[in-house]
Image: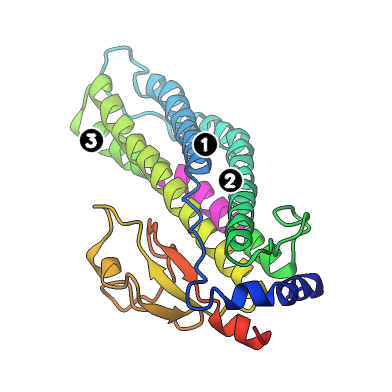
Amino acid sequence: MRPEVFQALKARAARIRKRRGRVRLKPVPFPRRAELAYTRALKQYARDIRETYLREVLPVLDRDGDGVANTVPLGELSRALLRVQDTVLAAQPRAERAARDMVATVNKHVTDGLNRAYLAAVGVAPFGPKAGRTDAPTSVDQVLANRLQANVSLITSIAPTAMDQAREVIEDGIRSGLRVEELAKRIAERFDVAESRAVLIARDQTGKMQAQITEARNRELGVSKYTWQTSGDGRVRDSHAELNGREFRYDDPPVTGDHGERNNPGEDYQCRCNAQPVLEDVLASLGI
């Protein structure tokens, strides 16, 4: 905890004591705008790859002009696929910029939200003017770097996975003598799956980003425990609903998955739950 935050809390000790037992923070809402912007960018990335693939590969397969997928010289198909790969490489930096924008936006959203919540609860906004930027404290820097790397890895896996599946479709189509228009539909379906995966990546990674920034910020203040809080709607999975209102430690999260996986709120796949920080131990350590 930064010295100025410690002093500010001590200066408000009398006010905080009156609220002992009722010091609760308002949850930071899910960063929906960041999720939507990230989703749009990744969907466009997947669509660009699909359109390029269809534009470059289908004419090669219909080289005889009879509308039937034909066996083509390997070199000719390889050149078409290389052109697709060039497009993928050219589009990738845009998707990676979208990931960086999401990371920065969610960091600021969470940090500002926690500042407002702490200010309302204990009269102190603990994260200074540099919070939310790239020169934030080391623990947060590490979270930002790790989440960005994870997102770049996921983004770069979208195209190869879709292209491998499309190749299998092409091979099957040539063997069975499919018409090119039918083959185009099947290839498009493979890339539709890639687009759906891009949407899931955006939603899941935005939630994980919020959860891990929240944990890092709370740990800066010495918070080690939290109360699990669901989003309270019909989309909450049963296993998470059972955790609602229960207290856990960040370093000893509960089981949230069918196979014994342990996660803090927001870390499970597409989880929208919140970690309500337990402040009593922190205040006690300050003599409040």
The magenta stretch is 148-161
Q: Is residue 71 above or below residue 151?
A: above
Secondary element type, mark 3: helix
Q: Main secondary structure of the magenta part?
A: helix
Instruction: From the top left corner, tell me how far across and down residue 119 is, in percent.
Output: 63, 60
Instruction: From the top left corner, tell me how far across and down residue 172 is, in percent.
Output: 24, 38
What is the CA distance from the residue labelled 3 to the residue labelled 2?
44 Å
Whether residue 145 appears in this view of the structure is yes
Q: Residues within 10 Å of mark 1 (few under 14, many from 20)?
A: some
> Three-letter amino acid code at disc 1?
Ala
Q: For residue 102, which numbered disc appears in the image?
A: 2
- Going from the N terminus, do you reach mark 2 or mark 1 first? 1
Q: Is residue 216 left or right of residue 278?
A: right
Circle 3/circle 1 CB separation < 8 Å: no
Residue in view at x 34 percent, y 72 percent: 245
Q: Nearer the viewer, residue 113 or 98?
A: 113
Name, please, the residue furthest toward the top.
65
Whether residue 167 appears in this view of the structure is no
> Three-letter amino acid code at disc 2?
Met
Q: Nearer the viewer, residue 73 or 194?
A: 194
Instruction: From the top left corner, tell me how far across and down residue 243 is, in percent.
Output: 31, 73
Q: Which residue is mark 3?
A: 175
